[in-house]
Amino acid sequence: MKRLSTISHSPVQFNLATLFLRIGFGALMIPSHGYAKLIHFAEKKDTFMSFMGLGSTFSLGLTVFAELFCSILIILGLFTRLATIPLLITIFVILGIHNWEIFGEHELVPAFLVGYLSILLLGPGKYSIDAMISSKKR
């Protein structure tokens, strides 16, 4: 049995960690963020912030795309690194709206930032559709 203080890991541990990271951060974003905005789209479309002058309806649509559809892609491990980019942009916009306050009422936002940056850097891992597609090409 490995000691708990070791810094090495097996490929299985690494791939399980990337799977848990993808499922965890993908699943946390969907219900109260992406899906909630989708079902209340008509109510929020006129009052949502206009990102870079794109209009509130289009900005809300981009946010729903990122928070719902990109989160689903991350859970599945399909286009994983590409799917994290809209989520990271959304997180940076949210941080900007809240004056880059990383502690306090909106402390979950920086946690999402750390999670999505980790997913971007680590990639999808072996237990993903990306890995299955990649192995079939070889």
Image (spheres, rainbow, N blue to C red):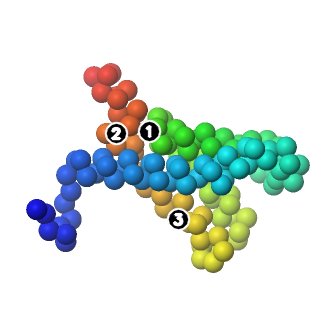
Residue 103: in sight, yes or no?
A: yes
> In the image, what residue occupies the spot 63% across and 51% down?
31
The tag earlier along the polypeptide, 1 or 3, is 1
Separation of marks 3 and 2 at Cα, in angstroms: 23 Å
Labels 2 & 1 near each other (Cβ < 8 A): yes
Q: Mark 1: which amino acid?
A: Gly
- 73 left or right of 97? left
Picture quarter with the N terminus: bottom left
Of tags 3 and 2, the one toward the viewer is 2
> In the image, what residue occupies the spot 48% across and 43% down?
75
Separation of marks 1 and 3 at Cα, in angstroms: 20 Å
Which residue of the protein is positioned furthest toward the left in this rendering?
Answer: 1
- 81 left or right of 103? left
Labels 3 & 2 near each other (Cβ < 8 A): no
Q: Secondary structure at mark 1?
A: loop
Q: Is residue 117 above or below residue 71?
A: below
Give 53 or 81, whichever is nearer the viewer.
81
The tag earlier along the polypeptide, 3 or 2, is 3
Q: Mark 3: which amino acid?
A: Ala
Residue located beneath label 1 in the image: 77
Residue located beneath label 2 in the image: 127
